Image: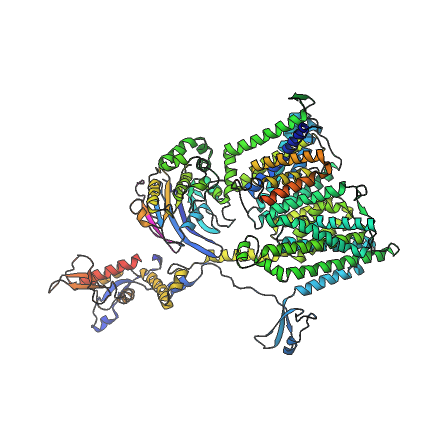
Amino acid sequence: MKEVLKVEGLSAGYGPLRVLHDLDLVIHPGERIGIVGLNGHGKTTLFYAIAGLTGWQRGSILLNGQQIGRSRSQGAGRYTHKIVRQGLAIMPQGDEIFNGLTVEEHLDSGAFTPEAWRTRKERKERVLNLFDPLRKLMKTPVGRLSGGERRMVSIGRGLMTDAKLYLSDEPSLGLAPKIGLAVMDALLAIDLKDSAMFIAEQNVALLEGRVDRIIGMHAGKLKGEASSGVQLGSGG
Amino acid sequence: MDITFVLTNAIIVACIYGLIAIAVSITWSSLGLINLAYGFIFSFAGYGAWMMAEYVTENPALVAATGIAVGALGGVIVCLTVFIPLHDKPNFTTRGMIATLAISLIGSQAFLMYFGPRPKALPEIFGFWKVDFLGITLTSDKIGIVVCSIAMLAVVVFWMRGSRRGLEIRAMMMNPHAAAIVGIGIRSTGVYVMAMTGAMAGLAAILLSQTYYISPFSGLTPLIKGVSIALCGGLGSVQGAVIAAILLGLVEALTNQFLGGQYVLMTQFLVIIMVLIVRPRGISGLLDKAREQ
Amino acid sequence: MSDANRKDYVWHNPLAVWGTATGNEKADSIEVPDPRDVWDENRAFKVPTYKVGRLKHYIIWPTHGDRLWNRMRWWPTRRNLLHIKGQYNRKTLAAEKKIIDRRPIYWALCLLIIALGPLFFPADMMNTLMTAGAIFGVFAAINVCWTLIIGTASIFSLATYAVVGTAGFISSWVSIKYGIPWYFLPFIGSGVGLIFGAAIAIPALRLDGFYYALLTLGLNELCRVFFTTSNEFGSASGGLYGASTFVNDTWEPITQSMVTYYSSFALLIGALFLFRLIHGKRLGRILRMAPEKREAFAAACGVDYKRARITIFVVTSIALGFIGGFYSAQYRGIAFSIFGFDTVLLGLAMLAIGGIGKAEGAILGTLVVVFLDKVLLELGPIRHFMIGALMLGVVLFLNNGYFGIKQQFNAWRDKKRGEWRSSRSEKGGEALPEEATEIEDKDDLYFRRFDKLQRDYLKGLVTPQIIEEHRKQPLGQHSEALERVLLYFRRAKMEDKYALHRAGAQGPYKIIAFSGVRGVSPRLVDDREYATLDEGYHGVFMRRVHDLMET
């Protein structure tokens, strides 16, 4: 089976600052992968590089067999929407929500493919089954929600389409430990089928034993089973 | 002249200029672009409709549809020449405004060179008929203007509320960065927004040319009025623009009635300045969380 | 170290001939590559490198050291004419000087060219050029003032021409009605400017930039409609004419145009002085501390930026009123076209082409636009088309007009350079730059680096041959490859250093590891037992090899 994500020799940075140093990474279908590392070592930059949001990048990124890496800097975010449409769901750090939209509209906005838009009712229902607290907040503007609810909205928005790769950046950041755990539980309970999930986290304890492999990130380089050739179990 | 006449005039003026005001408002809040090229789009749509009437058919519906389509085309032209190259550059707001002004300068000169300075008249779209409604005589064009502009506005509002594109536009108004993350392309959305607002300006051109003529510089007054209404209502707010349009239409009608035509702009600006001094972001600029910068 | 570089050979113990050798007599081994190769390979850049730094193209003038201290000064201040730096040539030690800021020279040259311009105008175009020159002077003066408002005070006002026009109309009207002589008109205009400026400054206090821009655009239209429709200001003749003037009808036409030209030029000089006084002095510096979007910070530092902005706005409005009065005194009146939307557009084109916020930008832009508009008259309506296209092009491609090109190019070049340099840097890995700054002992960093290179080198030497060689004879003389590996192992730190523990009187042996801390006993590494000492040595060796290959 084809890899969901295959990164080769990826370097990326912002202007004169180089954050990622020649990374190689392979993600197989059905895998859940955790990436851990301290602040400022490049976890978010790796996600941004996959989404085409860094200042410049170099190297090859194959998402589902299609090249999405770029060697020229053409302005951060210029092609992000196209990459997203090729099957990437981003649940960004700090949520990046639309303050004025209601929870329902917010979930709708995640369903950007025509097919997802047509079946958005069922999809919303699926997200609500995962995040039950949102059910009675459907008509509330997102700006009024609490941090945990916002996180749920932000993750739920990412789940509205059938992405090949889900990128979740620090899903427990800034949340109370219990809520963080609940969010993580929900994230790990998602049925991946043949897509894959990539979770960045600082708290290793939240991921330990619950993901297929954990990759360390240090000083812009990956440590551990980054390019593991063997395909592990089909998610758990 | 009685109060009903004043009111109907106020509503008609509000309808036409309100369309442009809402166009200005939506463009600003979703794209961050102060589009002062609506004068150009206005004349562009007018000339398009005129050419349709002159060379192809005088069928009112077709002429109006041409006007709207050409207006949308004008909007797309402005989007392609201004928004897409500039939107990620420094000083985008200032440069975007100057660029739209440059387009209106170029456009009006081009019209002057091509069509000449003589004004052109469009055929009557709504025919000649009258209706007595609760003792008020309403002529066909008045009813037509009101119905058309309200219909257009309803379509736009419904589209913005209900459709996926509308949702995308509203999402982009709130947070352009997050919009990219959920797969909303800023450029393509920009084209949709400008086509839609251009169509609104095109309709306004068709409606206004029932009373006035089309000339190279005829877009200026509607632009100024539209911008003033948008300002007064608060940039970025459709409800605010509607309220402001009615308010300023009323002021115009009342001034015409009691002071005389040449004072219209003066009273209107006094009202706008007073509103803005009390609420610097317009009537409802504070109500909703539109883009603030 | 790739396998291709390895060359197998049979090693003969050089001590064997004397019969004193311990160890193998001969063994299969590999050729040892030069250790410097790893070092060179790691230190080399695999990409082309370029020289860094930048050349400053200063003209160096010779000087006598003494002359530096006798500079010319602007009377009566102590300011120098030019910002000159004295220095000694590094090679020859000759005294020399360089001009740090050459802009005053350029200004003087350009103004001199404008002043002497009429001498060089071709005779057949004299009239056109003189008229255009006079208009250029007036408009350049207006635009310099406008630059003060938009650039220095960051108030995006589009009502500049409305102020000028209102002042011009009212002073003309006063002059016609009450027979006021021309030398009062600029001052009447100033008064009108003060009132008008103060009135439109009130909304500027409350409104944000672009709300204000749109509002002033409307005000401009309001003025146009008011003046064209009112009876007093003569709606029929396209303007209000008949004011008192300093240009005497009885003079020769050429004298008249000379007077007009030079009076406009004097007006421009005055506007430039105003710009210098406001932009270069206290008010301008205050506002440079409070750029857009950082006003709150400036306010926290004690900068009353609102007051400064309004002061500049009102002072500039007075100046604009003065220009309006001057205009009507020079041209006997003023036309309605001053309020036209096209005038605002052309004015904005002038500012945009040169670059908003700079006096030289305003003047260059005015020169370009006036040349297109007033000199190339025979082109017809395409002139405005060209101005519009020029304006659009400048706005689309340049961040801040012509005079911003240098800065924009430098910024672009720096960005690209930074990207290129960082994207081709091949280093990193042992220690993060930010980690390195935290480590007190820099020797440690160098040691880590060296250690990594050494490990990389030694990994290439570990082959089945040398393992077999060691297995056969752990002690004694070995081939060079094995010897190098063993030397590295022997140098290991006490912490986690392996040792053999004899479990019984004659064996077996177990591998232990030292704690590295005095008083803490060694720990048992694993339960494996080795029957003889040599097997034990080899077990330790294998463990070390394993550790080396893991890192």
Horizontal side of B261 relative to C245 (left or right) equals left
Q: Position of residue C359 (x, y in %)?
A: 67, 57
Residue A217 on the magenta span: yes
Vertical placement of A44 versus C119: above or below?
above
Residue range in magenta is: A214-236
* Occupied quadrant, residue C89: bottom right
Residue B168 on the magenta span: no
Q: Residue at x 68, y 22 (%)?
A: B130
Q: Residue at x 39, y 56 (%)?
A: A219
Q: Position of residue C513 (x, y in %)?
A: 22, 62
Horizontal side of C25 relative to B118 (left or right) equals left
Q: How is the image coloured?
A: rainbow
Horizontal side of C120 relative to C428 (left or right) equals right
Q: Position of residue C500 (x, y in %)?
A: 18, 63
Q: Position of residue B99 (x, y in %)?
A: 63, 46
Evaluate whether residue C294 shows in this view: no
